[in-house]
Image: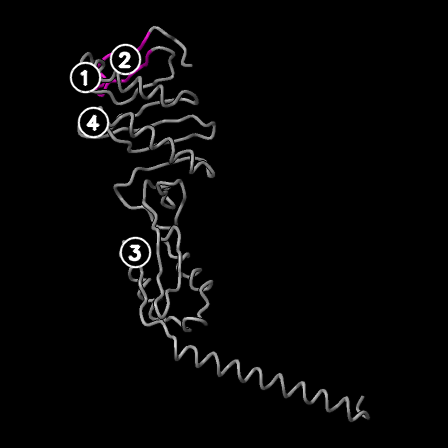
Amino acid sequence: MWDNPDALNRISRLVLLATLLFAFWVIGRATLENLFPFRQVTVIGADHADTQIAARALSSKLAGGFFSMDLKDLHGQFDRLPWVRQAQIRRLWPGRLVIELSEHRAAAAWNDRATLDTYGALFQVTPWTGLPRMYAPEGMEREVARRYGEFAKVVKPMGANIEQIVVSARLSWRVRLGGAQIGDNAISVELGRERLTERLDRFARFYPQAVAAVGPLQRVDMRYPNGFAGEPLRSANPKVETKHAKPA
């Protein structure tokens, strides 16, 4: 080939053409960025202070113009922010970039290591004091979030709220209730492994009668077919229980 002038000429022309095309591409890209930069960047949905600060920092470092910006990379940067559940980014002609964020809504603390949102998804924000506490095997996040919503509706009419849910390794559920109508001392309610909402509803209906009879309760076992056993707040008071001797 090196002894073939025609072949060398063809290779030289191809190299020259590739060099010219690359130069045109570089010049064209720079021209487009200069002619069509993003003149306005709008961030929607950054309600949490940490997200607002991070969004401003990312927006100040945007690289590229309307045609050249790598939106996939930018999307990934916003999607990785701790409070962001979902990010959507779009161009609006002629020079506007719109970044729409959906943030997590904190529902509870999960195993004291992360925060559970209302969709049952975990996000890596350290849980703070005041959040309900959830303790359950990993992988049960969605189930616990769903049950939490059901339980909260059941106990709301009695003026109570869910302070804690514990699911054991054997999948037995226990709920701790608090609230203005409960008083300063929370109530622990054993629900077992089945008919959870039904049992909690039964507790909510009969709780006022039990309190009227024996005073405040600190622990209740709802694993009985037609009633419950309760432990009064004052240990001197007798235990309240049904005639059913064995929990279901």
Mark 2: amino acid: Lys
- Which residue type carries mark 1? Gly
Residue at 44% across, 60% down: 76
Left-right relation of 29 to 131: right
Q: Which residue is denoted by mark 1 in the rendering? A: 215
User: Is label 1 in a helix, a strand or a loop?
Assistant: loop
Q: Position of residue 75 (x, y in %)?
A: 43, 60
- Under circle 2, the secondary element is loop
Q: Residues in magenta?
A: 227-242
Query: How far apart in space, not on screen, are marks 2 and 1 (Cα)?
Result: 11 Å
The verdict on residue 145 being magenta is no
**Residue that carries the numbered disc 3 in the rendered image:** 46
> Element under label 3?
loop
Question: Is 10 in front, or is 58?
Answer: 10
Give the number of the mark in front: 2 or 3: 3
What label does residue 159 carry, if any?
4
Spatial CA distance of label 4 from label 3 is 33 Å
Between disc 2 and disc 3, whose residue precedes? 3
Residue at left offset 29%, top offset 22%: 219
Q: Going from the N terminus, do you reach mark 4 or mark 2 first?
A: 4
